[in-house]
Image (cartoon, rainbow, N blue to C red):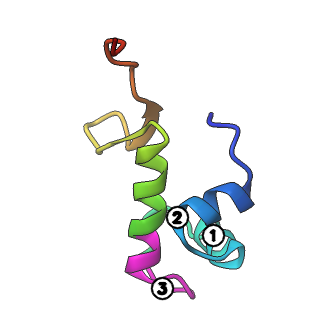
Amino acid sequence: MLSLSQADLAQSAGVSVETLKRLEGIRAGISVGQGVSADALAKVRSALEAAGVEFIAENGGGAGVRLRKPGPQAR
């Protein structure tokens, strides 16, 4: 969606690529652990949100992500 490499996202989030790889390996519904701290998860989420990703809560259709709609252009 964002065309970010693992290295780019890891740098933006302030985590290592290895931490990002462990995070990507966590299955849905499994709590933080497996070598990934809650702080690292929060940093990655913040970096993705800053890049324009919106996290969608479970609302009957399943949790997910989408790109934020562009706002009005600043002049």
Q: Quadrant of the C terminus?
A: top left
Return the x and y of residue 44 as percentages of the image width and height.
49, 62
> Which quadrant is the N terminus positioned in?
top right
Discs 3/1, front: 1
Question: In this picture, is 60 found above or below 40?
Answer: above
Residue 23's place in the image compared with 9, above or below, is: below
The spot of residue 46 in percent (x, y) is 40, 57
Q: CA distance from mark 3 to mark 2?
A: 18 Å
Q: Residue at x 25, y 38 (%)?
A: 59
Q: Nearer the viewer, residue 75 or 68?
A: 75
The magenta region covers 32-41
Q: Which residue is mark 2?
A: 13
- Three-letter code, disc 2: Ala
Question: How far across and down, in percent of the image, does residue 50 sit?
Answer: 42, 46
Q: Is residue 70 left or right of residue 48?
A: left
* Residue type at the position of mark 1: Leu
Which residue lies under the disc numbered 3? 33
> Sequence order check: which comes first, mark 3 or mark 2?
2
**What is the CA distance from the residue labelled 3 to the residue labelled 1?**
13 Å
The residue furthest left is 59
Relative image position of residue 27 (x, y in whole percent) = 55, 66
Few, some or many residues within 10 Å of mark 2 (<14, 14–19, 20+): many
- Marks 2/1: CA–CA distance: 9 Å
Does the CB distance between marks 3 and 1 fall below 8 Å? Answer: no
Residue marked by disc 1: 20
Q: Are marks 2 and 1 in contact (CB under 8 Å)?
A: yes
Disc 3 residue type?
Gly
Kindly check if marks 3 and 2 are in contact, taking CB atoms under 8 A apart as contact.
Answer: no
Say whether disc 3 or disc 1 marks the residue closer to the N-terminus. Answer: 1
Is 29 a magenta residue? no
Within 10 Å of the Cα at label 1, are there few (<14), some (14-19), or many (20+) other Cα atoms? Answer: some
